[in-house]
């Protein structure tokens, strides 16, 4: 991901790619040996050191974990950072008190990788998922993942200066940012929670303290650079 104002890359030139999977060619750490199937993500991969688009990558051993049982290398990358992000987001929401029996969960950017995997995971856990997308022709796909309701992304964009709206969702997963984040903050139920990890809709969010002190909502940032796979 490249963002003009995000200051994501720490060094230049650099080969991007936040995650990778492959077979060990050589290791100076006893935890791994030649021929091991491994995966790596987060930390400084793709931002401080060259990442997953490299044909051959030199990765610090502490960034690397063995390929989980039951997954092929290809399957691990089909989940990849998007799946990891979805899982961490749901885990944070549940630690904040979100439960399947307490109302709908909104997933913005639902047609994207992290969005679609969030829907699948939430549905498997028993949540009623509302999927927001700009691609309404993906309705059948999103329904097949487990979404109970599909709405257009324009329906979850803040377009007024009211500090709060009628409470609708107990929680939300937000890969979008910008005015979508503003809308979600205004429409969460008391003690609701929002997990944010994206900026495709912009990095600026204009809000007030009223939703936080009036409804006690939880705004949770998801930063994969500091939550590596081998820590969860």
Image: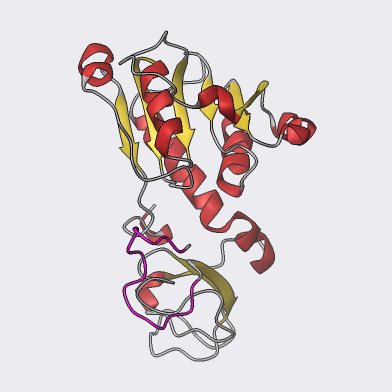
Q: Residue 189, how many percent across, how many down?
A: 39, 13
- Which quadrant would residue 61 be assigned to in this image? bottom left
- What residue is at 57 percent from the left and 72 percent from the top? 21
Residue sticking out furthest to the front? 160
Is 7 in the magenta? Answer: yes
| Front-lying residue, 211 or 163 | 163
| Residue 45, above or below 138 | below
- What residue is at 51 percent from the left and 67 percent from the top? 19
- Which quadrant would residue 44 be assigned to in this image? bottom left
Instruction: Specify the principal SS of the magenta part.
Output: loop
| Front-lying residue, 18 or 157 | 157
- Which quadrant would residue 134 be assigned to in this image? top right
Q: Is residue 63 left or right of residue 104?
A: left
The stretch in magenta equals 2-16
| Front-lying residue, 193 or 157 | 157
Q: Is residue 31 visible in this depiction of the protein?
A: yes
Q: Residue 24, how many percent across, how many down?
A: 54, 84
Q: Is residue 86 left or right of residue 44?
A: right
- What residue is at 54 percent from the left and 33 percent from the top? 108
Q: Residue 59, how many percent across, how many down?
A: 42, 80
- What residue is at 70 percent from the left and 34 percent from the top? 145
């Amino acid at each position: 991901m490249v963002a003009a104002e995000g200051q994501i890359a720490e060094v230049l030139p650099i080969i991007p790619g936040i995650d990778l999977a492959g077979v060990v060619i050589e290791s100076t750490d006893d935890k791994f040996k030649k021929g091991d199937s491994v995966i790596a993500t987060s930390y400084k991969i793709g931002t401080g050191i060259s990442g997953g688009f490299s044909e051959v990558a030199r990765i610090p051993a502490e960034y690397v974990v063995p390929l989980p049982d039951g997954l092929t290398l290809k399957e691990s990358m089909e989940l990849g950072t998007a799946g990891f992000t979805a899982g961490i987001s749901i885990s944070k929401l549940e630690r904040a008190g979100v439960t399947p029996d307490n109302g709908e969960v909104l997933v913005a950017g639902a047609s994207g990788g992290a969005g679609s995997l969030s829907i699948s995971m939430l549905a498997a856990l028993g949540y009623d998922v509302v999927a927001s997308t700009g691609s309404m022709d993906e309705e059948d796909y999103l329904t097949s993942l487990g979404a109970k309701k599909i709405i257009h992304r324009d329906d979850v964009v803040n377009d007024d200066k009211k500090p709060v709206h009628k409470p609708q969702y107990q929680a939300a997963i937000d890969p979008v940012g910008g005015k979508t984040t503003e809308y979600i903050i205004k429409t969460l139920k008391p003690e609701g929670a929002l997990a944010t990890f994206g900026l495709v809709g912009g990095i600026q969010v204009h809000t007030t303290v009223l939703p936080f002190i009036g409804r006690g909502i939880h705004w949770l940032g998801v930063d994969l650079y500091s939550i590596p796979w081998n820590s969860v």
